[in-house]
Image: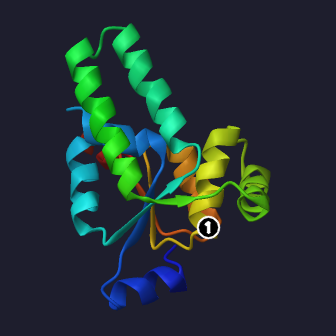
Amino acid sequence: MVSPAATAGRTAGRLRVLFDTSALVKRYSAEAGHEQVLAVFGRATELVVAAHCKTEMAAALLRRRQDRSLSSDEYERAWSMAQEDVADMEPVPLDAHVERFALAAMEHSPLRAQDALHVGSALAARVDLFVTADRRQAQVARQMGLDTECVVPAEMKEAA
């Protein structure tokens, strides 16, 4: 479902995008969905980020370093890049407006609080596109009226 706000923003040459952590972390490692995330970054004219995203990114990257799927050098490079990117994005403060949207999202489907906060942040920020690698979150975001792109490997797209 494409929201009227998304259509209006795109025709004006604007593409305001919010990536949730599951999608954004793909920017920093060569994994399934990496190219798709880079392509959306290239199209975006404005990037916004949920207030809790940086903390979630740190947790995800630290987990990968601890389970040795990222070397210490790869972790340092990825974390440095992530911090620079987030610093350049417009933050969406965690306020009552975001929380109301997050609660509404959780009423649609059992989402984790962090995932619902990304959806709530995207709605509060009136983004043109919400990007996630979580299918359930993508489904809820669409139900809430967000134009949503789900980052999944090509072989999974064919099965979906």
Instruction: Count residues near mark 1 (Cα–Cα under 10 Å), then give few for <14, some for 14-19, many for 20+.
Output: many
Quarter of the image holding residue 76? top left
Going by the numbered disc 1, the residue's amino acid type is Leu
Residue 9: give x, y in percent of width and height: 42, 84
Check the image and tell me how it is coloured: rainbow
Asked if residue 61 is positioned above or below residue 115 in the image, the reply reads above
Residue 28 seen in render = yes
Residue 91 lies left or right of residue 86; in this view the side is right
Q: Residue at x 29, y 34 (%)?
A: 80
Q: Residue at x 36, y 57 (%)?
A: 88
Q: Residue at x 21, y 63 (%)?
A: 42
Residue 120: give x, y in percent of width and height: 66, 58
Choose between 5 and 61: the one closer to the eye. Answer: 61
Choose between 20 and 74: the one closer to the eye. Answer: 74
Quarter of the image holding residue 63? top left
Residue 36 lies left or right of residue 131; in this view the side is left
Q: Residue at x 66, y 48 (%)?
A: 116
Residue 5: give x, y in percent of width and height: 52, 83
- Residue of label 1: 123
Secondary structure beneath disc 1? helix
Asked if residue 16 is positioned above or below residue 159 in the image, the reply reads below
Residue 54: give x, y in percent of width and height: 49, 40
Asked if residue 44 is positioned above or below residue 119 in the image, the reply reads below
